[in-house]
Image (spheres, grey):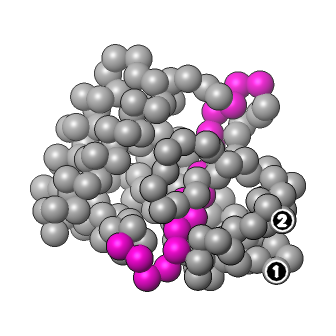
Amino acid sequence: MYPHVQSFITEDSTQHYTQQYEYYHALLFQLLDSPVKSTQHIGGTKHFNYPTEPILDILVGVNNLHDITALDEKRLNYAGFYRLHHAYHKKVVMAQFNNLVDLKQHVRLHIIQHHTPTFEQYIAVDTLLHNDKAAIAFFNQQKQALAQPPTTIRAYETYKQQLFSQLYTML
C-alpha cells in the first residue's frame, strides 16, 4: 500500500466527488443480498472546509457488523474494494485503490453498525466539521501540522482518529 499521506486538495470544481458518491451509493445497494442499509458521503471531499486527501469517504450503515460475511466481502472485492487490516474498533474499513501497483486509496468505506456510539460519533463529528467554524479551524490546523513531515498512513490515521475523539468532546 502507498506508504505516505497523499497530497491534499482544496476544491472540487467539477463535482467529481459528489458524482463518485452517487455512483458508489448505487453500487453498494445493487450488490446481491447487500446488508447495506444506508450510506453517507463524509469527510473533507464532501464540503472542502479544509484541505483533504483526494479520497472519497463513505459511511456505510449495516444492521449488524456480523452481516458482513465472507460472501459480502467477496462481492465487494469484485467491485474493487479490499479490506484494510488494521486494528479498527467496531468497524470494517475497505478501500478501492487507483491501481494494484501504487495502491493509493481513492475510495474508502467505513462500515459501521447502525445505532451504536461509533456510528453516532461519525455522524456528529462530520456534522461538526461541516458547520462549526471553530471546530473546522482547529481540525484544519492540527491536520496540516500532522501532514507536514512525510508521515506514514498508519500514524496519520491514528492521530486523525484521536482528533475526531477530541472534536467529539467539543459537542
- The image position of residue 61, as x and y in percent, is 56, 75
**Which comes before the other along the chain, label 1 or label 2?**
1
Does residue 40 appear to the left or right of 149 in the view shown?
right
Q: Which mark is residue 71?
A: 2
Work out whether residue 48 or residue 121 is closer to the camera in this orientation and state it: 121
Is residue 90 toward the left or the right of residue 169 in the image?
right
Give yes or no for contact between labels 1 and 2 (Cβ–Cβ under 8 Å): yes
Kindly identify the amino acid type of the residue bearing the numbered disc 2: Leu
Alpha carbon distance from label 1 to label 2: 10 Å
The image quarter containing residue 65 is bottom right
What residue lies at 52% left-to-right and 68% top-to-bottom? 112
Identify the magenta region: 101-117
Report which quarter residue 78 is drawn in. Answer: bottom right
State the residue at coordinates (46%, 32%): 154
Q: Position of residue 117 (x, y in %)?
A: 35, 73
The verdict on residue 116 being magenta is: yes
Q: Is residue 87 left or right of residue 62?
A: left
Residue tagged 1: 33
- What's the residue at 41%, 39% (across, down)? 157
